[in-house]
Amino acid sequence: MKFRPLRSAPHPASGTAEVAAPPETMRAVVFDAPGGPEALHEATLPVPAPVMSELLVRVVAAGTNPIDAKTRGGRGVFGAIDRHPSTLGFDFSGVVVSSPHEAHPLPPGTEVFGMVPFPRSGGSYAEYVVVPSLSVARKPAALSHVEAAGVPLAALTAWGLVVETAHAHEGQRVLIHAGSGGVGHFAVQLAAYFGAHVTATGSDRNLPWLRELGAAVVIDYATTRFEDVVGEVDVVIDLVGNAHDDTGSRSLSVLRRGGLYIMVPTGAWPGYAEAADAAGVRATSYKVVPDGGVLSTLARLLDSGAVQVYVDRVFDLTEAAEAHAELERGHSRGKIVLRVGDA
Ligand SMILES: NC(=O)c1ccc[n+]([C@@H]2O[C@H](COP(=O)([O-])OP(=O)(O)OC[C@H]3O[C@@H](n4cnc5c(N)ncnc54)[C@H](OP(=O)(O)O)[C@@H]3O)[C@@H](O)[C@H]2O)c1
């Protein structure tokens, strides 16, 4: 007898439907060696096979993140890639093709979004991905796949920074650098949602939008030195660091004694811990966790409208090199997403 789930009605947040069996091969965008955006090229690869508790997902859209471009250029997680050609990409939104067992809560046909464990497996710039069940959640029903693909890595990072590390709460004063970027626009919304008083830096064109997202104070980093106007804060969420200027170093001077400095871009300021110690503040770096449970919570916030994702540009999978060039300019508002397949 065919297995019938106990829950007879479809899950309210996302539909399920019959799905076609996967083909043997798929389109993907890969790179063979470190290089510029032109290193990315199309390839035909075998469709990956799930084992144990993994899901096979047909990708409808893939989100891009700065770490994709860093890795393509030989930095980021390039050192952990053990074979080429390699498929980049952490974020995806798509449809489950096969589940580990009949009673699994995410059966074939379920619309899901999540993070691929790249570089341990192939990335999401491909028509199919294999992904651990625990790194996935039901796609928010209110979002398209393109919108949902812009969420996972950036929003999970923002949650990790704002909720799990800064413990955002009523009255807490938080300064967020690069509030208009992929991580920043989620961090501003989450910090405001949990009652913090948010100051965000961005360029002139993004300041009204940062206010709409919930920032009480906005600062144009191109014309104003934030330390001249910000006063004392409890937490700095630094999405810029010291790689291009001294944003990180200057951030220490606005923290109250014992305040918390969070350095997010890995490697952007190797000396942050010693400098923070000398300044009498606490400091930590951060690494995103692909937690499907947190992603489910974020999906509820997105479905309710309490948090929104902003997709700046959408490129076809075949235009991944252009998407990377845009990503590397470093001035996108919200997210850049690749359209991979049909919804
Ligand atoms: N450790 C981790 O787990 C983790 C996770 C996610 C991201 N990250 C890292 O965190 C950084 C941010 O990621 P992201 O995805 O948010 O990047 P992103 O979307 O590319 O950020 C772009 C934004 O940065 C703003 N910006 C650029 N320079 C700025 C400055 N000096 N001051 C204030 N804002 C500035 C730009 O604003 P304007 O256009 O207004 O100039 C733009 O909106 C990246 O280095 C990324 O690799 C680390």
Image: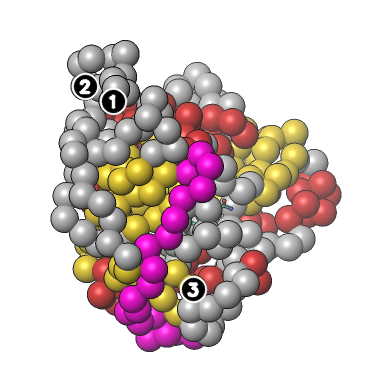
Residue 215: x and y in percent read 38, 37
Q: Which mark is residue 10?
A: 2
Q: Position of residue 150 (x, y in %)?
A: 33, 50
Residue carrying label 1:
2
| Quarter of the N terminus within the rendering | top left
Q: What is the spatial separation of the Cα atoms under label 3 and label 1, in whole angstroms?
A: 39 Å
Sequence-earlier tag: 1 or 2 = 1
**Residue sitting at x 39%, y 25%:** 103
**Vertical relation: 312 (above or below) 82:** above
Q: Residue at x 66, y 44 (%)?
A: 261
Please report the bounds of the magenta region as a residue range.
Answer: 35-54
> Residue 86: which disc?
3
Q: Amino acid at mark 1?
A: Lys
Tell me how far mark 1 sits from mark 2, CA to CA.
Answer: 17 Å
Give the foreground label among 1 and 2.
1
Amino acid identity at mark 3? Ser
